[in-house]
Image (cartoon, rainbow, N blue to C red):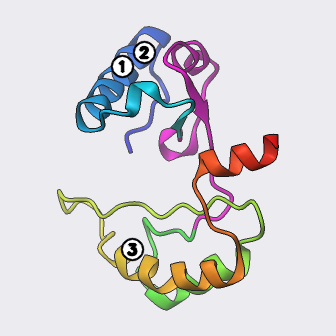
């Protein structure tokens, strides 16, 4: 989740291209998707990102429910935060645990296991692409 703030357009385009190639090497369907999603690292977006993102077919999405999972360690608090702030159409951001151990995100798996059944009971849960499709119907 390295910030792109301070990058110029060319540097960002190269970094985005490397990430796109990596994902494509892991997912054979990647290049054929109708929409590819991009979340700006650390939530910061610059105008210089627009052209490279468009060239590779990305749409940008930000979350509206962020339980401070990069700082808070309390599983119940984070799960309750998500449930208190989620509403129809919300995008919830929980970071994947960091394999390098630089962040204490290991609790996020437990948060997900606790909150996902509650979200499914309260809302129709889906992917960003499913949410987009529903909004365009």
Residue at x 31%, y 29% (from the top left corner):
24
Mark 1 near mark 2, Cβ–Cβ under 8 Å?
A: yes
Q: Magenta segment range?
A: 39-66
Residue at x 64%, y 20% (from the top left corner):
47
Can you identify the residue that label 2 sits on? 13
Return the x and y of residue 133 as percentages of the image width and height: 71, 44
| Circle 2 residues within 10 Å: few <14, some 14–19, many ≥20 | many
Task: Give the structural element (helix, strand or loop) at label 3.
Answer: helix
Can you identify the residue that label 3 sits on? 108
Task: Give the structural element (helix, strand or loop) at label 1.
Answer: helix
Tell me the CA gap for discs 1 and 2: 6 Å
Residue at x 49%, y 31% (from the top left corner):
33
* Magenta highlight on residue 43: yes
Task: Give the structural element (helix, strand or loop) at label 2.
Answer: helix
Can you identify the residue that label 1 sits on? 17
Q: Is residue 36 above or below residue 70?
A: above
Return the x and y of residue 115 as percentages of the image width and height: 53, 82
| Circle 1 residues within 10 Å: few <14, some 14–19, many ≥20 | some
- The quadrant in which the N terminus is found is top left
Left-right relation of 65 to 29: right
């Amino acid at each position: 989740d390295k910030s792109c703030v301070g990058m110029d357009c060319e540097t960002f385009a190269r970094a985005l291209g490397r990430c796109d190639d990596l994902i494509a090497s892991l997912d054979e369907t990647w290049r054929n998707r109708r929409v590819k999603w991009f979340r700006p690292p650390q939530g910061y977006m610059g105008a210089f990102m627009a052209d490279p993102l468009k060239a590779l077919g990305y749409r940008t999405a930000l979350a509206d429910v962020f339980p401070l999972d990069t700082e808070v360690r309390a599983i119940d608090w984070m799960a309750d935060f998500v449930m208190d702030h989620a509403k129809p159409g919300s995008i919830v951001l929980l970071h994947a645990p960091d394999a390098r151990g630089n962040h204490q995100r290991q609790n996020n798996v437990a948060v997900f296991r606790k909150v996902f059944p509650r979200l499914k009971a309260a809302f129709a849960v889906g992917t960003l692409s499913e949410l987009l499709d529903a909004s365009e119907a």
